[in-house]
Amino acid sequence: MVEYNGIMTYCEITEGKLPSISREVLGCGRRLADDLGQELYTVLIGSDVGSLAQEASALGPDKVYVVDDQLLKEYQTDSYVAVMEKVVRQVMPLILILGQTSLGRDLAPMLAFRLDTTATLDCVGLAIDPETKLLLRTKPVYGGNAQATFTCDSYPQIATVRDKAMSPQEPNASKQGEVITIGAGLDPSAIRTRLLKRVQENAGGVRLEDASIIISGGRGIGSAEGFHQLQELAAMLKAAVGASRPACDNRWLAPNRQVGITGKIVNPDLYIAIALSGSIQHLSGCAQSKSIIAINKDPEAPIFNYADFGVVGDWKKVLPAFRDKLKELLPE
Ligand SMILES: Cc1cc2nc3c(=O)[nH]c(=O)nc-3n(C[C@H](O)[C@H](O)[C@H](O)COP(=O)(O)OP(=O)(O)OC[C@H]3O[C@@H](n4cnc5c(N)ncnc54)[C@H](O)[C@@H]3O)c2cc1C
């Protein structure tokens, strides 16, 4: 019978660095490994990733598996799935955790299919069932209106975790995990896609994913000029500007600023929702915010059911008053 051991995390690399999601996944992995009394492993895949392996090894794993190959310079589904399958078959971990990023969303289900197991995407909570020792995978369902917890007894148990849902692992230079190199063994002709060009998205201010404060506007803002007022306020608060789908569809703001089930999922400390009604599809993207402030002229707007603080009024009057008060309160 095959024996599965240890908790494995996938350590993502973005622009030559370890992004916060890699530390969050490692933080979650450490907690699960301690709960199960198992070792923690992480996998680093790329080209010239030697120095990152040292950085990753200070983030708490007992072992760092490194696959370093020129063919792995850029993420390609074919090459990365093949390499991950090889690593997982060699190590046979009980659990594999990845970030809910564009890479994780692509890699996890493909890998689960190849390994004849299941993957649960977009988890906001992972824990160990004290009785069965299976991975409890909690994720939002019904457009974010409820949470469900899933288990599956096929191995490895694969899950992706949502950005900012887990506490990041702090580095500890005195604790270095063992670095183990695994050959990629790739056949270049089996990689069916090629990266021709990389186009940098113009973030236009603070990125939604990184912001601790987000100011979002809806259809009631009425125009691109209206959004300039939101941007002015955002600059004062070092905040990012988001929008509902109608506002993006009207091109008042770029499509990459849409929050919601078909846009971005965000969880800032503060979400200020201005002149948006609070549809289920929008709330699916922002309901995890720590605090929500709503400004809406309709006292019956659904957003008030979710807001911690609400102002009933015309945003064109409320916003300038809010901005003036902030100017008074904020240091120069
Ligand atoms: C499959 C699917 C996916 C979707 N995905 C998304 C998604 O990812 N994100 C998303 O946002 N939507 C999404 N939608 C659309 C969603 O259903 C709603 O239609 C949308 O969120 C409504 O946007 P809104 O709140 O800006 O507009 P509305 O619902 O029209 O609300 C406008 C609000 O502005 C208020 N208002 C108007 N004027 C003022 C004023 N002067 N001062 C103050 N308040 C004012 C009104 O009282 C009203 O509450 C999706 C829909 C479908 C079917």
Image (spheres, rainbow, N blue to C red):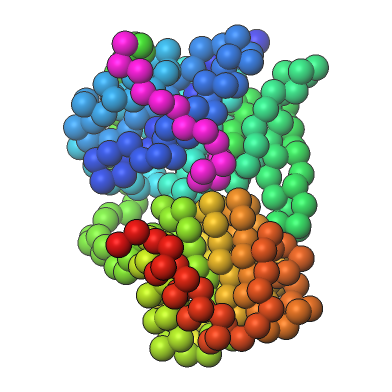
Left/right of residue 283 with respect to residue 188 in the rendered view: right
Based on the displayed image, in which of its 4 quarters is residue 2 positioned? top right
Range of residues picked out in magenta: 160-174
Based on the displayed image, in which of its 4 quarters is residue 276 positioned? bottom right
Residue beneath the point at 50% across and 68% down: 215
Residue 114 forms part of the magenta stretch: no
The N terminus is located in which quarter? Answer: top right
Residue 162 forms part of the magenta stretch: yes
Main SS, magenta region, reads loop
The image shows residue 4 at horizontal and vertical percentages of: 59, 15
Left/right of residue 206 with respect to residue 263 in the rendered view: left
Based on the displayed image, in which of its 4 quarters is residue 273 positioned? bottom right
Please state which of residues 87 and 33 is positioned toward the viewer in this rendering. Answer: 33
Can residue 138 be seen in this snapshot? yes
Please say if 330 is above or below 290.
below
The image shows residue 327 at horizontal and vertical percentages of: 40, 69
